[in-house]
């Protein structure tokens, strides 16, 4: 590949953006940026100005309103309307950005010179309605993208000011690789920069191809208005990753164009809760959908989960066990999005005292979004909810779907995630997450514990064998425990790391724990499991909880 300098890549990008209907605008310095913002602001809000241009005093009021804010505060201002008093006493509402990409004014400029602590020139800036919302830093081919991220961090400390606090998204590229990330008042870590992909998780890294897809005006506006989360607790913006966007869009299409259920298969650690919650937020703005209910299992609604939800929308979670609060939320016509547990919803539809409130939505279009849908959705509570809401749609998110081979057996029927929720609309698997460095990679090392001439896939060979007795044999389990003790130091890099030993059942865990306690070693061994309040005592000597305290 021929050498290309930063200047050549910059020129190619500007030319490409012109082809994508951005107007090339020359802005030499910050004053020129301010003057251009005034012209574009008046053009964008011309219906509010009613043919009367802004006076100097009126413009000063607007600048005072938008200037001097943090990045997070600027992001909130960008997404909201604001009121300014005009010289004649009228108080029209103005806005800085439209969710409809066709209503905005798009410009591209480059080499804007800004003087702060030092004088800096920014590579390429995308302006929407005169505001710099996307900043692109380019390095020549072969240069590590981390250098571009470090350069942005330096600019933020040395010269970003005023209107540049409205930057929502940064893009870094060396021509071959291109990544994006959200602006922040805090330090930006390289781990929070993302590649864009297609809906099959294939990366789009070349700068030209990235520009055609990611910097397309419609997608760019959607990324800023729909798929950016303002975390009020931590005061940061969170821009969603491509697989999260594709999953959310697929569910939105399913909800608005069909009445069919569906599920999303995103691996553990891929941010399913954020994707599910953002999908729920967007669907809650659709007037055709009367209620959107984000449904979780009670055991999953712990303090950490509640805090996570409240970061997305303050005060959104009722963490109590009181069903009457849920019923009150259902009756509130202004409450479009409800977060509750499957236990409370099942109680609400089954309790006659709540019949009037719950029957209001019996035949309405209600959307249920279920986090970790492989849990608690195969029982009677789920069936009760489905029976009550006759026109409801159910969308599930899971990292571990149930298939025929691992489905829940109910009589002669094997219940799977597909049988409950229908088709899988989008998948992002563990291999994708490892490739993207979203989760830690792992190495599989198989150790054979049984010898014999047999075929593991031949079911007829095990008809007369107690398989559980074989796997739970003292000799086999002791051998495994000794192997772990003997190899722990080498496998954990001289014990720099800890390890988790996952086993098949609580009885197996208890037995392994006892075996480890009976072997001479210097490791600290702890057993962790969840017990049921009303467990089946058949073939059990004690309640599993007793093992925790023995």
Image (tube, rainbow, N blue to C red):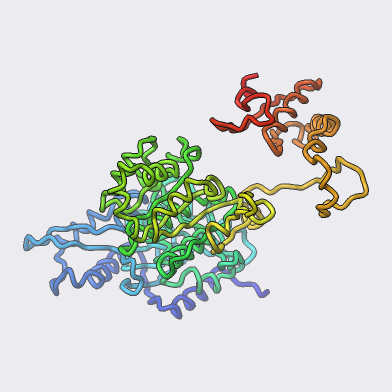
Q: Is residue 536 left or right of residue 318?
A: right
Q: Is residue 19 left or right of residue 526?
A: left
Task: Quarter of the image for the N terminus: give it.
Answer: bottom right
| Residue 334 in the image: above or below residue 317 | below
Q: Name the residue at the left extreme.
A: 88
* Camera-nearest residue between 362 and 62: 362
Q: Is residue 369 left or right of residue 353?
A: right
Task: Quarter of the image for the C terminus: give it.
Answer: top right
Residue located at (31% from left, 39% from top): 324
* Camera-nearest residue between 17 and 409: 409
Image location (x, y in percent) of residue 209:
55, 73
Residue 544 visible somewhere in the drawing: yes
Q: Name the residue at the right extreme.
A: 453
Quadrant assignment, res 223: bottom left
Residue 33 visible somewhere in the drawing: no
Image location (x, y in percent) of residue 434:
65, 53
Image location (x, y in percent) of residue 179:
54, 61
Q: Name the residue at the front extreme.
A: 411
Quadrant assignment, res 33: bottom left
């Amino acid at each position: 590949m021929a050498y290309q300098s930063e200047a050549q890549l910059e020129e190619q990008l500007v030319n490409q953006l012109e082809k994508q209907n951005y107007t090339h605008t020359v802005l030499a310095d910050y004053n020129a940026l301010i003057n251009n913002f005034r012209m574009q602001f008046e053009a964008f809000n011309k219906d509010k100005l009613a043919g009367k241009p802004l006076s100097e005093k009126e413009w000063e009021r607007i600048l005072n309103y938008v200037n001097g804010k943090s990045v997070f505060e600027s992001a909130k201002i960008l997404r909201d309307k604001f009121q300014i008093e005009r010289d004649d006493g009228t108080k029209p509402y103005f806005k800085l950005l439209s969710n409809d990409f066709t209503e905005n004014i798009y410009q591209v400029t480059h080499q804007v010179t800004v003087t702060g602590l030092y004088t800096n020139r920014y590579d390429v800036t995308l302006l929407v309605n005169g505001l710099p919302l996307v900043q692109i830093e380019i390095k020549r081919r072969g240069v590590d993208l981390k250098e571009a991220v470090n350069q942005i961090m330096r600019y933020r400390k040395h010269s970003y000011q005023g209107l540049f606090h409205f930057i929502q998204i940064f893009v870094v590229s060396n021509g071959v690789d291109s990544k994006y990330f959200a602006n922040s008042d805090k330090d930006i870590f390289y781990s929070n920069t993302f590649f864009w992909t297609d809906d099959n998780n294939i990366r789009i890294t070349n700068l030209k191809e990235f520009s055609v897809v990611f910097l397309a005006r419609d997608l760019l506006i959607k990324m800023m208005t729909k798929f950016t989360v303002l975390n009020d607790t931590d005061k940061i913006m969170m821009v969603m990753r491509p697989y999260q966007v594709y999953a959310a869009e697929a569910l939105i299409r399913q909800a608005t164009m069909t009445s069919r259920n569906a599920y999303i298969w995103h691996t553990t650690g891929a941010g399913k809760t954020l994707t599910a919650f953002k999908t729920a937020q967007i669907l809650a703005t659709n007037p055709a959908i009367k209620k959107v209910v984000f449904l979780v299992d009670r055991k999953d609604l712990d303090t950490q989960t509640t805090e996570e939800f409240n970061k997305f929308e303050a005060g959104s979670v009722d963490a109590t066990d009181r069903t009457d609060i849920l019923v009150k939320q259902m009756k509130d016509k202004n409450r479009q999005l409800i977060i509750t547990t499957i236990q409370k919803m099942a109680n609400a539809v089954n309790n006659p005292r709540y019949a009037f409130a719950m029957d209001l939505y019996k035949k309405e279009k209600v959307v249920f979004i279920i986090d970790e849908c492989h849990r608690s959705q195969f029982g009677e509570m789920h069936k009760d909810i489905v029976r009550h809401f006759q026109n409801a749609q159910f969308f599930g998110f899971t990292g571990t779907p149930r298939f025929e081979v691992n489905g829940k057996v109910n009589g002669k029927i094997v219940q799977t995630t597909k049988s409950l929720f229908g088709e899988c609309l989008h998948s992002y698997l563990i291999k994708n997450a490892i490739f993207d460095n979203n989760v830690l990679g792992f190495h599989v090392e198989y150790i054979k514990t049984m010898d014999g001439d047999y075929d593991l896939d031949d079911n007829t060979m095990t008809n007369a064998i107690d398989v559980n007795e074989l796997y739970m044999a003292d000799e086999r389990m002791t051998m495994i425990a000794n192997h772990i003790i003997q190899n722990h130091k080498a496998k954990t890099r001289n014990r720099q790391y800890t390890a988790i030993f996952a086993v098949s059942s609580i009885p197996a865990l208890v037995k392994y724990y006892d075996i480890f306690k009976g072997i001479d070693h210097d490791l600290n061994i702890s057993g962790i499991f969840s017990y049921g309040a009303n467990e089946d005592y058949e073939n059990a000597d004690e309640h599993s909880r007793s093992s925790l305290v023995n």
